[in-house]
Structure formats: C-alpha cells, structure tokens
Amino acid sequence: MLPSLPTVEWAATELGTEPWTLLFDRGASVSEAGTKGWVVAGHEFDHPEPERFSSPCVGPIAFTREAFAKVGGFDERYEGWAYEDVDLWYSLQRDTPRAKPQTYLGTALIQFWHPQDHHDLTNANPNVPLFFETW
C-alpha cells in the first residue's frame, strides 16, 4: 500500500504544521484476480469504486519524527498483526494533538488481496488483550 505522489506531496504540506496526518479517508479492496491484473496493467485495470472508511483509524499515517519520539515510538510489546497501528494512532492523538481538524486530499487507498489466515482477532492473539489492557 503505497500512496500516490499527490498524496505524498499533500502529506508533506500537512506535516509542515501538524504532528501527524491520516493519508486516506476512503479505499477499495481488490480481489485476488484484480490484484493479479494490477500487477500487469496498473491503474488501467478495473477496480471497485472506493468507499469511505467507517473508521479513520487505518495503518497509513504520516507523522513527524518529533511526534514519533514524543509517543515513544511503536510499542514493541505488540507481535505481528493486530492493533499495533491503532495503538500508535491513539498515542499520537493523545500526546500530540492536531491544531486543526483532519482534512483529506481525496485519493483512495487501494488494498490488494492477500491471504488473511493470520488475521486473528480473538484473545489467542496476544495483541488483542494487550490493546484492551492498554486502552
């Protein structure tokens, strides 16, 4: 998941005055077949229409070095997938609040297909109880 050049340029401007910014407020998940098509044809390949996220808390976030240091970086108690990015985002909001409301450029996040067998949100995943104990 890489942002487009306009998104990177917009984020750089945002970070001139704000400690962090969410890069996307909408996105589309591409099927396995669609992902294979994008590898060959890129943006010319048909893809689903982006939809607004139900929650703005997603992994793609840009932040200043100072903001990252102020929150103590990533909590290294998290292992693998689940809540490590949410924990960082919550810490950024709490410890380095924005001066003005979040805005968005309007470009969409395209999430390519990948196996999700490791996406365990039960208490068997040590990140789940850790997150709820922390927050």
Image (spheres, rainbow, N blue to C red):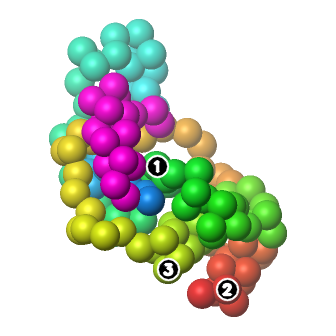
Q: Which element is circle 3 on?
A: helix
x and y, in percent, of residue 119 in the image? 62, 59
- Looking at the image, residue 107 sits to the left or right of residue 41; the answer is left
The alpha-carbon separation of the residues under discs 3 and 2 comes to 13 Å
- Closest to the camera, between mark 1 and mark 2, is 1
Disc marking residue 73: none
Q: Earlier in the sequence, mark 3 or mark 1?
A: 1
Give the vertical position of 124 relative to 50 (above or below): below
Checking the image for residue 62, the label placed there is 1
* CB atoms of marks 3 and 1 within 8 Å: no
Going 46% across and 49% down the picture, which residue do you hit?
A: 62
Please give the residue where the numbered disc 2 appears in the rendered image.
134
- Characterize the local packing of mark 1: few (<14), some (14-19) or many (20 or more) Cα atoms within 10 angstroms: some
Q: Which structural element holds mark 1?
A: strand
Q: Position of residue 118 (x, y in %)?
A: 68, 54
Q: Amino acid at mark 3?
A: Arg
- Tag 3 near tag 2, CB within 8 Å: no
Q: On the image, numbered disc 3 is attached to which residue?
A: 94
Q: Name the amino acid type tagged 1.
A: Ala
Placement of 2 over or under 109, stated as above or below: above
**Residue 44 belongs to magenta span:** no
What is the span of residues highlighted in magenta in the rendered image?
1-18
Q: Residue at x 36, y 47 (%)?
A: 16
> Which of these two is toward me, 117 or 94?
94
Local crowd size for mark 2, using a 10 Å CA cut-off: few (<14), some (14–19), many (≥20): few
Is mark 1 in CB contact (under 8 Å) with mark 2?
no
